[in-house]
Image (cartoon, helix red, strand yellow):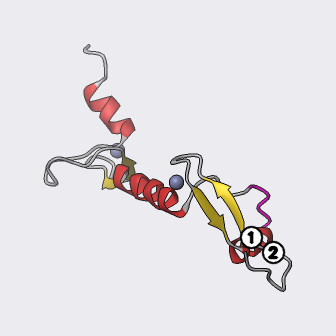
């Protein structure tokens, strides 16, 4: 435990994902209070990093082949050369009721 001049001191918190104890450092607490955050971090650094990587891995930027708008999809395009459609165009193209 290190007592800092700014009044914050390291705290031990429990990660809600892996259940491990982790240190919420005085420096991080100062950062939180400067940002106006009132919540304590719920996850340890490892789990926060894993979550971030997961989010990045699950979203892919694509350009719609029909309207040219850039959108995000939840799956990696299997074939980068095959046309990708945004939600709207996809629904119009493939899900419109047959006349
Ligand atoms: Zn964790
Ligand atoms: Zn489109």
Q: What is the CA distance from the residue labelled 2 to the residue labelled 1?
A: 7 Å
Q: Residue at x 43, y 53 (%)?
A: 55
Q: Is residue 36 found inside the magenta-colored segment of the image?
A: yes
Relative to 18, 31 lies left or right: right
User: Where in the figure is residue 33, as x and y percent of width and height?
Assistant: 80, 69
Residue 41 makes an appearance in the image: no
Q: Is residue 94 found inside the magenta-colored segment of the image?
A: no
Q: Residue at x 79, y 83 (%)?
A: 4
Neighbours of disc 1 within 10 Å: few (<14), some (14-19), many (20+): many
Confirm or deny contact between disc 2 and disc 1 (CB under 8 A). Answer: yes
In which quadrant is the N terminus drawn? bottom right
Q: Quadrant of residue 25?
A: bottom right
Q: Between 69 and 53, which is closer to the camera in this rendering?
A: 53
Earlier-in-chain disc, 2 versus 1:
2
Q: Quadrant of residue 5?
A: bottom right
User: Where in the figure is residue 22, as x and y percent of width and height?
Assistant: 60, 61
Considering the numbered disc 2 on the image, is that residue within a helix, a strand or a loop?
Answer: loop
Q: Name the residue carrying label 1.
A: 29
In which quadrant is the C terminus drawn? top left
On screen, residue 35 above or below 71: below
User: Where in the figure is residue 56, as x and y percent of width and height?
Assistant: 40, 57
């Amino acid at each position: 435990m290190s007592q800092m001049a700014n009044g914050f001191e390291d705290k031990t918190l429990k990660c809600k994902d892996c259940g491990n104890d982790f240190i919420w450092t005085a420096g991080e607490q100062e950062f939180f209070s400067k940002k106006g955050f009132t919540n304590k971090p719920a996850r340890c650094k490892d789990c926060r990093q894993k979550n971030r990587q997961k989010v990045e891995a699950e979203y892919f930027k694509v350009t719609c082949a029909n309207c040219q708008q850039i959108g995000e999809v939840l799956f990696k395009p299997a074939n980068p050369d095959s046309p990708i459609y945004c939600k709207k165009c996809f629904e119009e193209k493939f899900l419109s009721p047959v006349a």
